[in-house]
Image (tube, helix red, strand yellow):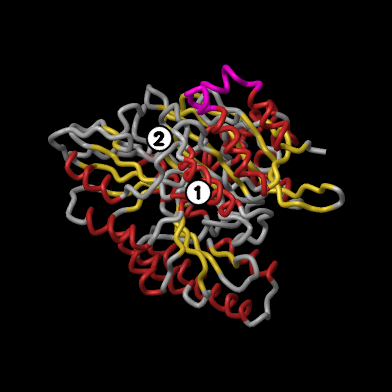
Amino acid sequence: MNEQLKLELQEEIKQFAEQLHKFRNKELSVKDFKSLSCGFGSYAQRGADSFMIRLRMNQGVVSKQHLKFVIDTCNKYNISDIKFTTGQNIQFHNLTGDEIPSIMLEALEEGIICRGSGGDFPRNVMASPLSGVNPEETFDVLPYARELTEYLLAQVNKYSLPRKIKSSFCNTKENETHATFRDLGFVANEDHTFDVYIAGGLGNQPKMGVKVGDHVPCEDILYYASTMVLFFMEHGNYVNRTKARSRFIQETLGVEGLISAFKERLEQTKRSENLKIHVQEPIIIKTGEGTISHPRAIAQKQKGLYAVYYHPICASITLEKLKEISTLIEPMQDVELRITPQQGCYIINLTAQEAKQILDITDDGAKTIFDHSVSCVGAKRCQIGMRDSHGTLEKVINYIREKGYTDGVLPRIYISGCTSSCGTNQIGHIGLQGTVKVLDKKPYPAYFLSFHGEHLFNKERFGEVIGVLLEEDACAFFDAIAQRVSVHNMTYEQWLETHKEELEEVIATYVKPLK
């Protein structure tokens, strides 16, 4: 972040503080305040009496310094509601509002930007969370994601976009960042190039991305980013917000028309701008002795080093736990946190002995595949949320935990409180999306239920909605599946392949028709 951008952001934060003051004095409507505040990564929560703020953790990387800032900020402003997001960020909830401008300014001094972490702006550029340390990666995409971040942040005040742009990089078949169905996605190839996808996304009428770049040299990625911004401004819908995401350009231009128009714009960009980059990929020189075997410990490609995975239940991490982790890793060389798109985190660059220490203090997290389930913040906090997705997930996880089932009888599920799909429900083997079901003229809290979503590279598909699950039946529904799987001593995936008729029986018992 250059000094000029920092000065611009500081001035904007002062202006935001004035509008926040007006809103709290009832001089500004909820709608008008939201249109302003969301661009700063801050929203009034449901009821407009409390607030949240989102800290951009670029690529999900949380250094020791940034972790200490998060802890000091929570101590200073008495913040206890902390959440990891599917965008690899950190959110603070239930703030009074008075502290938000100060947090923004203090974060800026630490190199943490809130601007553009909401609203009609390029969002946090995501990257595979184990970039640089994963033995299975094609190459380290993190430095390229950082280059794109710097470029997009420099443009944040120069353009008025129709809506947000979500960008990501992936370098394994896991495709954790959904690079093949983002507004702009870069998939790393073995020959150290990128395939580029655009105009994809979750939410209302989801779309897979369209491939517009094949084996693109790494030095050329900013040409695609610049072109995407200008292309979106040219063809995006500025009138109807529900149609303003880039994926709807597939409908207006058609796939072939989109590819042709994008490539034409790309050639113009290459002729008019010099955006080539030259990146030196970092080398980790730390090594370790000894070995460790644990389900949450992953051997890195660096000799003797490990990453430990920690998934706080429902992505809610306590301040006490952050303090505990921070204190432990402070003397450890090159150790940092990486937030995942599934709302967990890796602590990386650990020796075997250091990994054992981290495993010991993070034993309170997810124990089973089902414990690793994902949800958005839900309607208790979110103004547009229809269902309390967070509360539903917490209730179901606790219910299933009490039953003592073997790990694997249920898959990880994904829950969103509304059509925005912040909980990425459409890529879940089982996904839930908040709605209302009317039965005998009475409305009931409910979820659209989908099956067979997938995000793995070359296997991507969106889940098929098969009916509606009442919120009050959620625990019984998942318990019924777990019971049947347990009887056969199988995993959920094995059971689904061989006993599909039993799933249909559960669906017939608990799931209401769409109409």
Q: Residue at x 41, y 38 (%)?
A: 128
Image position, residue 332 (x, y; %): 18, 50
Quadrant in the picture for the N terminus: bottom left
Image position, residue 135 (x, y; %): 30, 28
Indicate the secondary structure of the residue bearing disc 1.
helix
Which of the two marks, 2 or 1, is nearer to us in this view?
1
From which residue to which does the magenta span run?
485-501
- Is residue 44 rendered to the left or right of residue 505? left
- Is residue 392 rendered to the left or right of residue 412? right
Q: Residue at x 61, y 47 (%)?
A: 416
Q: Amino acid at mark 2?
A: Glu
Q: Residue at x 16, y 37 (%)?
A: 287
Q: Which mark is residue 219?
A: 2
Q: Amino acid at mark 1?
A: Asn
Q: Nearer the viewer, residue 218 or 467?
A: 467
Q: Does 493 appear in magenta?
A: yes
Indicate the secondary structure of the residue bearing disc 2.
helix
Quadrant in the picture for the C terminus: top right
Give the farthest residue toward the right: 441
Q: Residue at x 63, y 44 (%)?
A: 474
Q: Which mark is residue 40?
A: none
Q: Does 299 appear in magenta?
A: no
Q: Which mark is residue 398?
A: 1
Mark 2 and mark 1 residues within 8 Å of each other at the beta carbon: no
Q: Tag 1 or tag 2, which sits nearer the N-term?
A: 2
For residue 268, say whether it is visible.
Answer: no
- Mark 2 and mark 1: span between their CA atoms? 48 Å
For residue 127, say whether it is visible.
Answer: yes
- Is residue 456 rendered to the left or right of residue 465? left
Q: Nearer the viewer, residue 152 or 410?
A: 410
Give the farthest residue toward the top: 498
